[in-house]
Amino acid sequence: MVGLPARGKSYITKKLARYLNWLQHSTEIFNVGERRRIAAGSDTEAMDQSASFFDPSNRKAALIREQVAMETLDEALEFLLVKNGSVSILDATNSTMERRKLLMKRIREKAGPELNVLFVESLCLDEHLLESNMRLKLSGPDYKDKDPIEALEDFKKRVAIYQKNYVPLGEYEEKNNMPYVQMIDVGRKVISHQIHGFLSSQVVYYLLNFNLAPRQIWITRHGESLDNLHGKIGGDSDLSENGRRYAQAMTKFIDSERRIWEMRQVDKANHTHFPPHPGDHTPPNPHYYCQDGEDVPTKNFCVWTSMLKRSIQSAEYFDDEDYEVKQMKMLDELYAGAMEGMTYDEIRNKHADEFELRKTDKLAYRYPGPGGEGYLDVVNRLRPVIIELERMTDHVLLITHRSVARILLAYFQGLRRDQVADLDCPLGMLYSLEPKPYGVEFRAYRYNSETAWM
């Protein structure tokens, strides 16, 4: 990573790592700031890490920062060269030409010429986005429990120190055929140079398709189906009476939550100030920044179902005037091939070897027979869905199936690959995933026919 403080580098790295790990490419983040806080704080006399710590003329601090950067890089290289990782992300400012040359020298000494290196720079030109990023820093580890006005002033001094020696990516990298990506205002504009290789291309594709817009993402399984009542997997049966009741209750609940969310955004917009009032450290939301007298915009709401009847019928109660409903083949349930329409007891009795094979490694298992799928096949077909969910700024509800819901929830929660196939995801659950600057806010609601939602 490359960029001045408060440019969203850590936000980008966390999203990238989550996406690449979800695609089964083992990825880890190595954060220089975390190691720096430990190194400077564990000195016999703990060093003050205010703005003066980052001044190049502070030789003791400069030596600590360089040592920490190299040690963190060594850790990142060990992950790739010894621990069989696929991608290491070095999360730091790396804002000077000297530092980047030093990094490349160390990488080539330790890993040779074959290791692909991609520089990703984050720039912020939008003053409201930058103000928001800076004020978010006030709740971070460097400024926790400090006066927000003093902390913001100190942080701006730190940024000014970095700014003096900052050299953006560009001329040098292009002369030396070094791959890089520049992101401006977290995706408003993206510049890429000399991108080669599968993983680098995946990174750039992902960076082109995400945004900071606040929105709601809802995920649920369809209502109970007739095949569910008989314990059959797959198939294309209708909803049961219970399933239709769930569909109606879910529609009313989403209607209500949508209105509450919009009112909350209006309230936030009315109580957030730019520039900040004394004592106010609430970040302004650049997507909801309105001039005096302007209304906060209302968001569109999409409902996506699979192409199977039980999913389509679960969306029947949404008003077409208020919701944009469409079907997607990509959201269909994992296809069980020769075992479609069977119960698990039937599979155990008639295909004991396959039953045991699946139990041994459910994630890698693929059902036999024409069109039979496994979890990794579903991950692959859901890739465009994930990209679209990251790209869009509208609210969306996905009414889908167990395997698909597991994989989508695993992505947004950043779960390990060994957790995906056994993730608990029963009927009657509605999951809310709200993207935030620090990650994803997750809530789960259970439907009960007597008490409605819990």
Image (cartoon, rainbow, N blue to C red):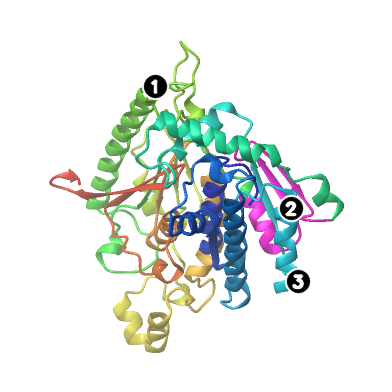
Kind of residue at disc 1: Pro
- Residue beneath label 1, please? 278
Q: At x 12% / y 46%, what residue is drawn? A: 450
Residue 301 at least partly seen: no
- Residue beneath label 2, please? 98
In the figure, is residue 267 to the left or right of 394? Answer: left
Q: At x 51% / y 36%, what residue is drawn? A: 155
Query: Mark 2 packing: few (<14 Cα in 10 Å), some, or many (20+)?
Result: few
In the figure, is residue 118 to the left or right of 128? Answer: right
Q: Which badge, 2 or 1, is on the more N-terminal residue?
A: 2
Local SS, label 1: loop
| Image spot of residue 226 (x, y percent) | 28, 60
**Disc 3 to disc 1: CB gap under 8 Å:** no
Label 3, label 1: how far apart the Cα atoms are = 53 Å
Label 2, label 1: how far apart the Cα atoms are = 39 Å
Which one is nearer the viewer's eye here, 132 or 278?
278
| Image spot of residue 362 (x, y percent) | 42, 76
Region in magenta: 177-206
**Which disc is residue 114 wearing?**
3
Relative to 236, residue 439 above or below: above
